């Protein structure tokens, strides 16, 4: 069976490092906010090329804390994407703000041209929460230009995009804050929940450290109603010793597989995203698009060849029940392309533990598919 994520194969590689780290933390008697979290934060910041990293409980909290560090106001508008994990939007709601949606582009990322037009007509928008979806970095020069031209606060959702680049620039380097997730399926996943916020601003990093720990400025003194959202010592040690050292290698493998798919999947019924081979994408997922009504047929065809696939995402965010019960959100541009992704997208396995033969099997399965129309 070719899985979307193969944790059994991953465990074979990381097992001894995980067990060593576990023994060390267990014996230390220090389990919350100690030296392991600090060590991992330094290593992550160095890996990312950003000055400060702050470990938190999960990716969604990293986004919420990021918005709150930037002093977001109650009811403040936050421009964001209709196509993402719901957590991207939920973080905006949790921060007491209002999501404003535009559409996505051909690669599924927020349409920055629509953002620009909206920012020109609505000068009350000060916040932007872009998502580097599927591990494909947005146009970072354009993002930086929007930030400067409109004086925006930008919180980049890099949960799927650790290490992604666009030209010379790295995803997460444009926003005042970047957020990432260590949810097990992510490119840098933990053995449980975890997340981090990254920033080049020492003051923001300090604020994030307070907010993750009950808004505590000194022991038992609380300056703000913060969260309990701390990265555990255990997860930090495991991430540092067993997972972070492999991210580069695993990302290279994802890229190789993605490039094989991009150059060799040739089926008129399958549309690949317009991403150049050799791009800086890190391929958290490998999305393809099929014609209306044919997705289930392809999924069954793959499944009959023991290939698992999945949909990211089957319902756009503005249409989620939970959002309808949180009035105040706005759909500024009809999310037509996002809706098409929700009806026509399918993600192929692209995890770094696929063998060459399995990559061939996926390519063959896609190329041999003849839709039953
Ligand atoms: C996974 C994910 C999140 C949320 O991360 P958690 O650690 O699960 O809270 C946010 N945004 C995107 C784009 C994600 O893929």
Image (cartoon, rainbow, N blue to C red):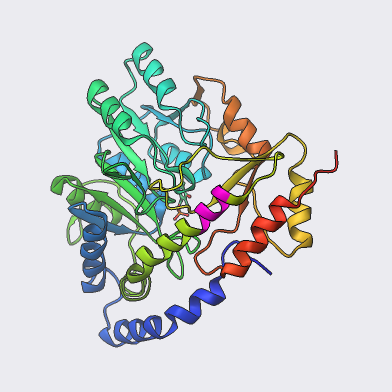
Split into 4 quadrants, where in the image is the C terminus? top right
From the top left corner, tell me how far across and down residue 362 is, in percent.
65, 59
Rendered view: 68 above or below 352 = above
Q: Residue at x 68, y 37 (%)?
A: 343
The stretch in magenta equals 257-263
Q: Is residue 55 left or right of residue 345?
A: left
Point out residue 280 in the picture as x, y percentages from the top left corner: 38, 48
Horizontal relation, residue 36 to residue 91: left or right? left
Q: Quadrant of residue 237?
A: bottom left
* Residue at horizontal 48 percent and vertical 54 percent from the top: 284
Q: Residue at x 57, y 70 (%)?
A: 355
Does residue 91 appear in this view? yes
- Name of the residue lying farthest toward the right: 373
Query: Quarter of the image containing the N terminus?
Result: bottom right
Residue closer to the observer: 282 or 44: 282
Q: Main secondary structure of the magenta part?
A: helix
Viewer-proximal residue, 62 or 158?
Answer: 158
Residue 321 occupies quadrant: top right
In reply to whether residue 117 is colored magenta, the answer given is: no
Q: Position of residue 25 (x, y in %)?
A: 30, 81
Let me know if residue 73 appears in the view.
no
Determine if the magenta segment contains residue 262.
Answer: yes
């Amino acid at each position: 069976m070719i899985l979307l994520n193969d944790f059994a194969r991953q465990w074979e590689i990381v097992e001894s490092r995980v067990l060593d780290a576990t023994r060390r933390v267990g014996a230390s008697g220090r389990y919350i906010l100690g030296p392991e979290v600090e060590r991992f934060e330094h290593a992550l910041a160095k890996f990312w090329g950003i000055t400060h990293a702050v470990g938190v409980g999960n990716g969604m909290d990293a986004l919420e804390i990021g918005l709150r560090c930037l002093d977001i106001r109650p009811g403040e508008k936050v421009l964001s994407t209709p196509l993402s994990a719901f957590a991207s939007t939920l973080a905006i709601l949790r921060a007491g703000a209002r999501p404003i949606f535009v559409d996505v582009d051909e690669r599924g990322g927020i349409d920055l041209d629509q953002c620009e037009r909206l920012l020109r007509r609505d000068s009350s928008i000060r916040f932007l929460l872009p998502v580097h979806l599927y591990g494909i970095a947005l146009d970072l020069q354009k993002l930086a230009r929007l930030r400067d031209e409109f004086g925006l606060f930008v919180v980049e959702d890099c949960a799927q995009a650790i290490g992604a680049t666009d030209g010379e620039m790295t995803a997460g380097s444009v926003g005042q804050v970047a957020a990432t997730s260590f949810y097990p399926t992510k490119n840098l996943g933990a053995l449980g929940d975890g997340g981090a916020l990254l920033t080049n601003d020492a003051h923001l990093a300090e604020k994030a450290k307070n907010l993750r720990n009950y808004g505590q400025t000194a022991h038992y003194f609380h300056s703000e109603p913060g969260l309990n959202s701390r990265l555990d010592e255990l997860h930090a040690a495991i991430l540092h010793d067993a997972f972070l050292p492999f991210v580069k290698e695993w990302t290279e493998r994802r890229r190789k597989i993605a490039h094989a798919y991009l150059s060799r999947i040739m089926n008129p019924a399958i549309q690949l995203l317009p991403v150049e081979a050799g791009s800086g994408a890190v391929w958290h997922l490998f999305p393809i698009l099929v014609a209306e009504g044919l997705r289930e047929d392809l999924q069954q065809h793959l499944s009959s060849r023991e290939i698992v696939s999945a949909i990211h995402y089957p319902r756009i965010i503005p249409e989620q029940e939970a959002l309808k019960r949180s009035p105040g959100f706005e759909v500024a541009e009809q999310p037509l392309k996002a809706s098409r992704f929700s009806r026509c997208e399918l993600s192929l396995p692209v995890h770094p533990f696929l063998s060459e033969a399995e990559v061939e099997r996926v390519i063959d399965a896609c190329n041999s598919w003849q839709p039953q129309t």
